[in-house]
Amino acid sequence: MDEPTLRQLRYLVAVDEQRHFGKAAEACFVSQPALSAQIRELERRLGVTLFERGNRQVLPTSVGGAVIERARGVLRDMDELVGAARLDPVELRGPLALGVIPTMAPYLLPGLLPVLTAAHRSVELHLHELKTSEILRLLRDGGLDLGLLALPVAGEDLVQVPLAVDPFVLALPENHPLAGSGPLPLSAVTDLPVILLEEGHCLRDQALSVCRLVGTHAAEMQATSMPTLCQMVATGLGVTLLPTSAVALEARPGTGLATRPFAEPAPSRTIGLVWRRTSPNEGLYRTLATLLTENLAGRDPAGTGGDVPVIRAGARARPRPDPHRVSQRGRRK
């Protein structure tokens, strides 16, 4: 039996991702007849039917699904082999795909990206704003190199390095009776309607765990994004738990929001960098994690010290990155 080629495997994975031969061909920068011919040849070589071909959708067969998963692994290993051959022991070079969750991207990237690109001037950075589950899937499939998200995540196949602790504050309308200064006990939210993000955001799960801890209820309404969530709170529909990293942007003067910190031990999330354990860039990624940790520690006016800094309220927003140095792809609300 003739062995499949890497090109055929890439086309196979593209068809599975797009569920459409025409769109897969566009993604691979080939004509549809050429891609279809390669898929048919792959099926001939393997002696199986890989896809159910319909008028509107293409679905993998049961055998096709198993072959596709193996193909992803082969392509991931090949990419890592090529990456190891081109590895610079000091500096990241070439394409680097970074996935960031939406509840971190607008608040952390303006400060972190200039640091990353200044230290690694030859890197071609591609940003993908995705939910945690999508980032983890793409990391494992080889579609992403790094993930910036909330720790911990499941899986011994991934390296997880904490960068900073991001405490939650209570966000409420500026005319709310609890608006003021000084820390609040966590029990202060017991009788308040807490608005959360929609399903799929890890921040929702973290806020829900706090609600369960104090016995309060989540409001029935949900928000699709952090800015929408804060606007709903500002109009008096409820309160929410806001990461401190988001305060400078979402609760700035004129937004109608007030924030109060929680008394210790305050609820928080851990910001972390994640990559595949098999990555040949392990050493460079750990150096990058240290660099980002130091940058986040620089946002802490109180100077907590320690290996993992605590983000404090009052940190000033960093300059926006030069759009000519960084290309953004795969942004998803």
Image: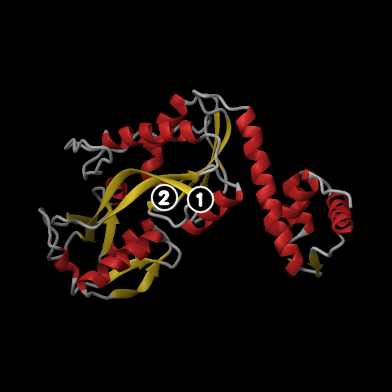
Give the residue pinned by disc 1: 157
Please name whichever residue, 56 or 205, is drawn nearer the observer in this view of the structure: 205
Name which residue type carries label 2: Leu
Q: Which mark is residue 149?
A: 2
Q: Is residue 121 above or below residue 258?
A: above
Residue 11 appears left or right of 212: right
Residue 120 point in image, percent of width and height: 48, 26
| Cα distance in 3D space between marks 2 and 1 | 16 Å
* Viewer can see residue 60: no
User: How many numbered circles does the render carry?
Assistant: 2
Name which residue type carries label 1: Asp
Residue 150 appears left or right of 251: right
Badge 2 vs badge 1, beta-carbon distance below 8 Å: no
Q: Which mark is residue 1?
A: none
Task: Of the two numbered discs 2 and 1 on the same chain, state the one appearing first in sequence.
Answer: 2
The image quarter containing residue 286 is: top left
What's the residue at 38%, 52% (across, down)? Answer: 150
Residue 157 appears left or right of 108: right
Residue 116 point in image, percent of width and height: 44, 31
